[in-house]
Amino acid sequence: MELRHVDPRNLKPNPSNPRRIAPSEHADRQMIANIKATGITQPPVVRQDGADLVIVAGHGRVRAAIGAGLSEIMVLVRGPDDGADNLRALSENVVRSQLGPVDQWRTIEALISDHWTEEAIGSALALPVRTIKKLRLLANIHPAILDHIAKGDMPQENNLRIIAAAGADEQASVWKKHKPKKGQDTATWLDVARALQKRRISAKHAKFGPDEEQAFGIVWEDDLFEQGDQDTRYTTQVEAFFAAQAAWLEANLPKNGVLLQIDEYGRGKLPPNAEQNWGQPRKSDTIGYYVDSREGSVKEIAYRVPKAEPKKGKNAASGGTSETLSEPTRTRPEITQKGLAIIGDLRTDALARALADNEIDDFTLLSLLVVAFSAENVDVKASGYSAPLRRGLTRRLAVEGRITQEAALVRKAARDMLAHVLTCRPGYHSSGVAARLIGDAIGADAHLPNMATEEFLSSLSKAALEKAAAQHSVLPRPRAKETRAALIDQLAGATFVLPAARFALSEEEIANQLARAAERAEEDEGEGQNVDGSDTEIGATDEDGDPEEDQQAEEFA
C-alpha cells in the first residue's frame, strides 16, 4: 500500500458500493464544512484497476472534497482486488459508532481551550451554534446525571437548561429520587426538570402549619417588593410545598370530602358520570378537594353522582311482577347553556349601564353595596386579580390622606365598584341572586337589548319558542326555524325581552332560594349567621310575610 496525491475528480466510484441511497443534503454539507475546516484526516482507500483508481472506501469523503473545491487529496492505494474489498466497503458504513453527546461536549470544551470560538466550531462541524451551546450546558450537570446522559439518553433542551441552572447538591438530591429504576433505559426528564425548576410558591396559599413546615423542611423567604399589608413570604421548595399541602389536606378532609386526582391540565378530575354543581353546594353534594398544580392552593369542587337507574327487564320489582321499567323521556330544556350564557352577558351589560345612568338615591346605593358584598363571586381575600382595580376605585375617595366628603365623587365610586363586582354571567365568577336583586331594584330591565335575534332564539326549545311566539300573536310553524323567522319579522323595530331573562326573581326562584336557605341553615347549624346573630338570608321573610330586608330598611330609616 502507498499514499498518493490525486485529483479527487479522477477517482472512479465502486460499482459494488453498498451505500446505494445517497446521504441527506445536511450530511453532505456537514462533511464539506468539516473538510474545509480540518482537511481529510482519514484518506480514502482506493485500488488500482488498470489505469484507473477505484474507490474501495470513502465515497463520501471524495464527494465532499470535490464539493469543497479541493484540487488534490491524499489516498491510500491498495493492490488488486483480493476478494475482500466488498467487506471493507461494508465495514466502513456499518462498523462505526456515533459520537455520544458527552464525548462531543468534551471535545468541544477541548477546542474552546485551544481558542476556538463556538461559531468556528459550529462552522467546522456544520452544526448550529445553538447546538454547540446546548452541549456546553453539560458542563453544569452533576456527574451522576452526566454518566446517564453518556449512555445516549439526552434530555430536551428546555429540560436540560433547567437542570443545568440548579446547584450540584440540588441535582444530586433530585436525581436520587427520579433516576431510572432497574431495567429502565430512559429517565423522566420532565419530572427531573420540574423538581429543579425555580418556581415561587406564595405562603398565602399554604393551608399547613409549623408542624408540616418542620416535617417537610420548608424554608420561607421574604419578597421585599410585595405590599406590606399582605403575606410576603414565598418558597422555592416546590416539591416540599406540594407534599406538605397534600399531607395537610389528607389529614383535614371533611366528612363529605374526597381527594380528587389531577387531570392533564392540573385541575381536579371528577369521577365518571359526576355532575359539577356550579351553584351553592348542597348538603347532599360531595366536595372534591385537590391541590392546584400551578399556584399550590387547595381547591374544591362540589359535585353529585346521579343515582343508578333500575335495571330493565322482568322481575325488576320486589314483588316479582313482570312489568318493565320504562326509561324516562329526555326533554330539551327551555333555554340551552348557550342561551343562558347570552342572557348572562346581556344582564351584566344592562346592569352596568343601569348603574352608570339610572337615578339611584343614596339610601338605595348603600343598600346595594351591602347586598353586593353577599354576592357569590365576592371573596375579598382570594380575588387578588381584581385588587388593583378595587384599590384604584378606593384611591379616588382618599384625598390628602382623608376620606373625601364630596358627594358626587362618592356616588360615582360606589357605582363603579358595584359595576366591577357584579356579574350575571354563568360560572365560577357569577354574583348569583345578589346581582338579580340589585338589577331589579334599579330598573336594569330597561337596558336589556332586543332578544328577537336568530342567535338567541335558536337557543330556546321548540316549546319555549312557540310560547314566546304566542305572546306576540305569531302562530307556530311546522319547523322551528320558520317560527323563529316569523317572530323576528313580527317584532321588527320593537324590543323583545324573554320574561325569563328579566332581573326580577320568579316565584319558583324565590321558593328555591328559601328552600336553599333552610337547607344551609340546617347544615351549618348556626354557622354563617349575621353579625347580629340572626339567620337572615336574601329572600327571607319576617313573621308578617313581608321581606325582612324591607323591615330592616324601615328600622334603618
Image: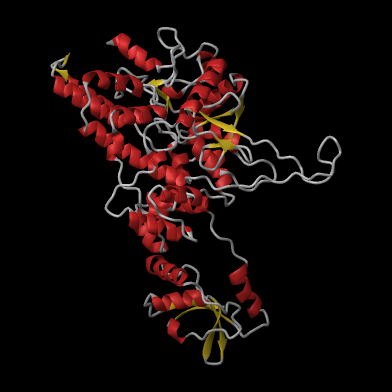
Q: As drawn, is 304 to the left or to the right of 430?
A: right
User: Total number of numbered labels?
Assistant: 0
Residue 45: x %, y % from top left: 54, 77
Q: Residue 196, how many percent across, how many down?
A: 48, 35
**Residue placed at 34% from the left, 42% from the top?**
346
The answer to whether 515 is drawn above or below residue 174 in the figure is above
Q: Is residue 354 left or right of residue 334?
A: left
Viewport quadrant of the C terminus: top left
Q: Position of residue 312 (x, y in %)?
A: 77, 45
Q: Quadrant of the N terminus?
A: bottom right
User: What residue lies at 52% left-to-right and 24% top-to-bottom?
Assistant: 516
Residue 119, placed above or below residue 352: below
Residue at (28, 32) in percent of width and height: 443
Q: Is residue 191 visible?
A: yes
Q: How is the image coloured?
A: secondary structure
Above-or-below relation of 143 to 17: above
Q: In the image shown, does 27 or 89 lie closer to the viewer?
A: 27
**Residue that protrudes farthest toward the bottom in the picture:** 50
* Closer-to-camera residue (12/160): 160
Does 187 sit above or below residue 203? below
Residue 110 in view (yes/no): no
Which quarter of the figure has residue 362? top left
